[in-house]
Amino acid sequence: MSVLPDIEPTSAPCPGTAQLAAVIDARPRDLGGFSVGRVLPSPARKLIGPFVFFDHMGPATFPPGQGIDVRPHPHIGLATVTYLFAGEIVHRDSLGSHQPIRPGDVNWMTAGRGIVHSERTGAQLRGSGSRLEGLQLWVALPLEHEEIEPEFHHYPAADLPSREIAGARIRLLAGSAFGERSPVRTLSPLFYADATIPAGSELALPDEHEERAAYVVSGTVACGNERAEPGRMLVFKPGVAAMLRPVGGDTRVALIGGAAIDGERHVFWNFVSSSQARIEQAKRDWREGRFPQVPGDEREFIPLPD
């Protein structure tokens, strides 16, 4: 999605729980008639491992004739990761990719030195009406890969490893965790998982990653004396064992983490870079039309924000 990350003082450290470093509540944002919950960046944490951005899209219900229309917009220095719980989004980009993403799939787009993409509701669902819910994350690229050639890869749900641990059902979307490794091509040590924890069970977070967090998608989860409902992210202390326990019913969580990023990252609009000068160049390039166009979606674009 095309968004301007903004940060408000809505999060705080969590000193009362030994496992937690911070608690972050999603802030509602309207992206032109479509609501998202903005989790990262936040005052408490700018990144979790290499994850520099975290949006919960929807849930939203579109009547016939309506849908999402995220017009072509650029990215540099990051990878976008799209994962849906419901609905469908049609991705197009300046590499010529044209790929619908459906629940359980992963769309991983590495921007590198620069890419342009759009995200829209397809004609069939637009005609019939649809429901949409999912997550979009950005991964800051390591210094040595910030300017690589852009890439796009689609991974069907059937290709992603899943397993059950003590009753919890886990699908590993990217990286390595829980004894599994995802086929998704990443450029830094990380993990990203979708886990459903049934009532009466517990799930221990993987401990091989330096930074870890759990975002509650549905249900309620307890960690120590902290409870988290949908829209809340629990950020765990490095090296401390962390256990999640559902409260009152099944709970669905998104788990993320990885090694701390190798240096400061600047963020403006859809641009992420270790160099402020590089971001200024990207701004000029977009304003002056030097980014490539999206085949099949050339008529519109999102202007550079002021």
Image (cartoon, helix red, strand yellow):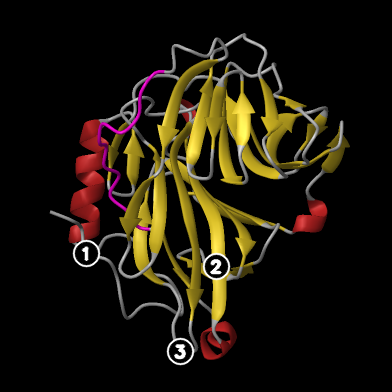
Disc number at residue 303? Answer: 1
Q: Is residue 132 visible?
A: yes
* Type of amino acid at the residue the image marks with label 1: Pro
Disc number at residue 132? Answer: 2
Q: Residue at x 44, y 21 (%)?
A: 22
Q: Is residue 189 visible?
A: no
Crowd rating for badge 3 (residues with CA inside 10 Å; few <14, some 14–19, many 20+)? few
Q: Residue at x 73, y 45 (%)?
A: 250
Secondary element at image label 2: strand
CB atoms of marks 1 and 2 within 8 Å? no
Crowd rating for badge 1 (residues with CA inside 10 Å; few <14, some 14–19, many 20+)? few
Q: Quarter-wise, where is residue 239 in the image?
A: top right
Q: Is residue 32 left or right of residue 214?
A: left
Residue at the extreme left: 306
Residue receiving disc 3: 65
Secondary element at image label 1: loop
